Image (cartoon, rainbow, N blue to C red):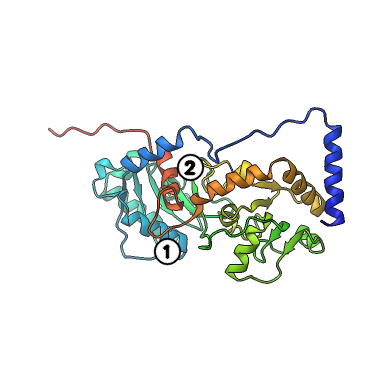
Amino acid sequence: MSTTTATSIFLFLFSLLLTTHSKPIPHLTSPYLSPATISANYDSMVKNFKIFIYKPNPHFTYDSPVQSLFYTALLDSDLATNNTDEAHLFFLPFPPDLPTRSIARLIRTIRTDLPYWNRTLGADHFYLSCSGVGYESDRNLVELKKNSIQISCFPTPPGQLIPHKDITLPPLASPHAPTSNTTTFLGYVRSNWVNDSAIVNELRANPEFLIESEPSTPQIYAQRLSSSKFCIFEYGDGDLSGIGEALRFGCVPVVITDRPIQDLPFMDVLRWQEMALFVGRRGGAKELERVLVRACWERHDQMRRLGTAAGQHLVWNVPPRALDAFHTLVYQLWLRRHTIRYVRRETV
């Protein structure tokens, strides 16, 4: 153990002796926000959820691998239905590079030729878009953006997510399985996780931290994930695609950010605040190390356990499996299904 870390641990223990009103860390056994209801809700979703998929014209492919995985899995699943009367939601696929005016024209055609959009002004529809849809004044685009559920890639571009309804696709995770559970490093930073971060640059001389300067092989990457207590990411400028892998490999994610994050995958399903740390830039490397050392004593084991349990939800399987990324994303759609039921007009 380095002298710096030993000093940090001593100061932390000393502060505990001086603290007389410290709050105990609650013992949590589940990574879910609603552990008492998720099982029953998930089973109900699997049995009952139906989605009507509009047929794109012409045929196209998504440019994001996770978007393609979701679309293919949805088309092949038992969720898809051709019976619009039993559909809870309607999926509107369109090319990722489709111009804004063309999207507006597509919505206009759907609302003119078919009755489904007008019943809720698009509130029971959803679409995939990594770049998001603009706030142009066209009525069709306004309804799509304001009412329909947007599924975007994580992280979502600034200003392109409405938290109460929109959701994000978890990034692709490494196919490698977790290896050793022996931790060697306090913190690990992969070469693409940060972008010239001053905090990370200060940590390069600290032997408790492994800071990559060049990309590692998948095997070495898996080993380093398993042998590190914390994995450090930077929100905004860095690459957060490894956050799901970090959870699965038992490396507690630490996200450097100066603002709240509203687009983490499955935010209304998982206890992200109990599985990851969110640290501001203002305190620099010393404050980051202090937070990590304190977390090691107070809550690392619980965070690691909860994160490992939640890791299954961020894995994309082909074909999909129960509770994996595809099914958890569909579960979020199920939670957002439109609850207003319209009386069908009786035919005479």
Question: Can residue 12 be seen in the rendering of this structure?
Answer: yes
Which one is in front, 335 or 100?
Answer: 335
Residue drawn where x is 64% and y is 42% of the image: 302
Quarter of the image with the N terminus in it: bottom right
- Image-quadrant location for residue 347: top left
- Kindly state the secondary structure of the residue where label 2 is placed: loop
Name of the residue lying farthest toward the top:
21
Estimate the x, y position of residue 269 in percent, counting from the top left: 51, 41
Residue drawn where x is 26% and y is 45% of the image: 84
Q: Disc 1 residue type?
A: Tyr
Which one is in front, 278 or 42?
Answer: 42
Task: Work out whether 268 lies above or below 6.
Answer: above
- Image-quadrant location for residue 225: bottom right
Q: Which residue is mark 2?
A: 165
- Kindly state the secondary structure of the residue where label 1 is placed: loop
Residue drawn where x is 43% and y is 50% of the image: 141
Taking the image as shown, residue 293 lies to the left or right of residue 302, namely right
Which one is in front, 77 or 342?
Answer: 77
Residue density around tag 2, few if under 14, some if 14–19, many if 20 or more, within 10 Å: some
Task: Work out whether 62 lies above or below 122.
Answer: below
Q: Which mark is residue 62?
A: 1
